[in-house]
Image (spheres, coloured by chain):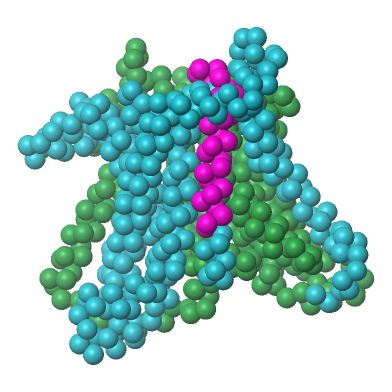
Chain colours: A cyan, B green
Amino acid sequence: MTASRRAPFRRNRLYLAGLSPAAFLLALFFVGPAIWALLSSFTNRALVGIDAANPRFVGLDNYVRLFGDPDFAKVILNSVVFVIGSAIIGQFVLGLGLALLLDYAERRGFLATSLVYAAVLLAWVNPTIIAGFLWVAMFDFYNGSLNVGLGHVGLGPIDWFGSGPMLAVIIANIWRGTAFTMLIFLGALRTIPSDIYEAARVDGANAFRRFWDHTLPMLRPIAALTLLSVTMATFGTFILIQALTNGGPALQTEVIALYAYHQAFQAHAVGYGSTIAVVMLALNLGFAIVFLRWSRARA
Amino acid sequence: MTSIAPNAGVAASAGSAAAAAPSIRRPKKRAGPVEWIAVHLVFLVVCAFFLVPFLWLLSAAFDEKATAYIQWPVVPTIMNFVRLFTEHDFGRVLANSLFVAIATMILVVIAVALAGYSLSRLDLRRKDWITYAVLLLQTMPISATMVPIYGLARQLGLRNSYLGLILIHAAIELPFLIWLMKGFFDSIPRHLEEAAWLDGRSRFRALVEIVLPLARPGIGIAAGLAFLAAWAEVLMVVILIDQQDLKTVPLAFYEAMRTQGGYTEVQYGVIAAMGVLYLLPVMVVFFGARRLMVRGLMNSTRGL
């Protein structure tokens, strides 16, 4: 803040120029598509046929249709179940548990700690499409490792994609995404000095009390942000589910991103697909604003 | 959604905490045998869950008669890899993917170095808003905008073109990496470059000669993450590319997976071989510089 308050644009013009390549790309591929979706949602734009060349303005027809669409109600319900199951219960709880376990094991000097850490991380960094393929094989009815393994202990076989498709995609997504939560919590846990635990131990606090009184309060602020962040990431899941079930059978795993895609590219209703995209963007914006407020409150 | 960083904000909070109190460790206490066994039993279960799919991938890749069940091949063979290159023209696919990922990486590094530095040094009253706008874009799922991006790319003639693919891959990575780089530049004192200006260097030369060398770890992290993200991204490839000679690895993988059901017999072995080759660069980049990468995601994004 050394320069004068006058002529801020003149003073900053080089910096604004430096921002411009990135700003151009962001405008073209983030802002542009969002506006395109909003405009298309008021038309009957189609992928093929007569409406493809000359989309007509149809006002709020798409929105009226969307909110009366029983399939869309099912899709929203699926998305909620998927997010709660895989992000909130699965990744968050498992990630927190793993972070606590690894931090504990690290403080104890267990050598296998880094192997477990790497295993969880590997599932996270591998390309999503590979994750999809791996779990297609794992869930295979006749030869899949899961069913064969269950057979060895006298259980199953389970028709994963037939009778429990939602559970299957949730398991795959837990496998894939747990590392993020684990990394965040591990980072936070590592900042807690061991002395605190020693002091509490000397005071006679048991393991549960040490966790409840000392560990948890230090994790709470980051927990809310992590939860919201994981929720947003999971809400946009597309490729993993498409690879595993493609939304089926009978829309049982069709989440919102898949529904938008299927309406636009399979039913060729781009206008309607855009309407779904707009709803999705609006919901995400809501999450994001809450997220920013919380993180600002923390800063 | 890109795979690497679901959200920057959390990492920032964790990072600032980590920065405030670098880990203070006491000498380790010896664990009792019961505790050791209990912890390692849990470790075993966790490792099984996370590693069995990868072990299957590895075993299937070297097994000509691979099935979905995990078993080490009776006669390990590299026939799957040979078939991949002779029957599926995988050499070309691999080269295409490398080209796209490296070009994206270069573009991203240039764009985020400029943008991160500029955002760090910008002196506007409403600068916060720009930072928040970048964060807001970071949370926008690419799966929500894929329909419009398809439409837009068609109108702009960017379908079946690497230019389009590279620009889009770069754009997807920008919000998070701008934010990451801004954090790095914030930690470099301004008086260094101001001294260089007084010496008569231009603003750009001062950036290249003085500031960028100091930001080298950040640039390295940004380059690594950009490469990984472009290498792994599949959604945009699927909607933008359908010309066979432009095919990249994720698309080849996607097609091989999709045609397996139904009429043809599942070629698990060949697809698994493809998966191993697809995974290899990821493991090299990420685990070769794991600490750097994880630190990049967790530690250097303070400064909001």
x and y, in percent, of residue A144 in the image: 23, 32
Q: Give me the residue at 65% from left, 49% from top.
A: B174
Residue B97: quadrant of the picture? top right
Q: In the image, A19: left or right of A50? A: right
Q: Give me the residue at 87% from left, 64% from top.
A: A8
Q: In the image, B13: left or right of A71? A: right
x and y, in percent, of residue A290 in the image: 52, 57
Q: Nearer the viewer, residue B98 or B120?
A: B120
Q: Is residue B249 highlighted in magenta?
A: no
Q: Is residue B105 above or below residue A160?
A: below
Quarter of the image that includes the N terminus of chain A: bottom right
Q: How many marks?
A: 0
Predominant secondary structure in magenta? helix
Q: In the image, A270: left or right of B268? A: right
Q: Is residue B41 above or below residue B24?
A: above
x and y, in percent, of residue B263 in the image: 34, 12
Q: Nearer the viewer, residue B257 or A157?
A: A157
Q: Is residue B228 visible?
A: no
Residue B58: quadrant of the picture? top left
Q: Nearer the viewer, residue B28 or B1?
A: B1
Q: Which residues are magenta?
A: A265-291
Q: Is residue A290 highlighted in magenta?
A: yes
Q: In the image, A61: left or right of A137? A: right
x and y, in percent, of residue A258 in the image: 46, 30
Q: Residue furthest left?
A: A154
Quarter of the image that includes the C terminus of chain A: bottom right
Q: Is residue A222 visible?
A: yes
Q: Nearer the viewer, residue B268 or A29?
A: A29
Q: Give me the residue at 27% from left, 79% from top.
A: A210
Q: Residue furthest top?
A: A50
Residue A79: quadrant of the picture? top left
Q: Give me the residue at 72% from left, 42% from top.
A: A27
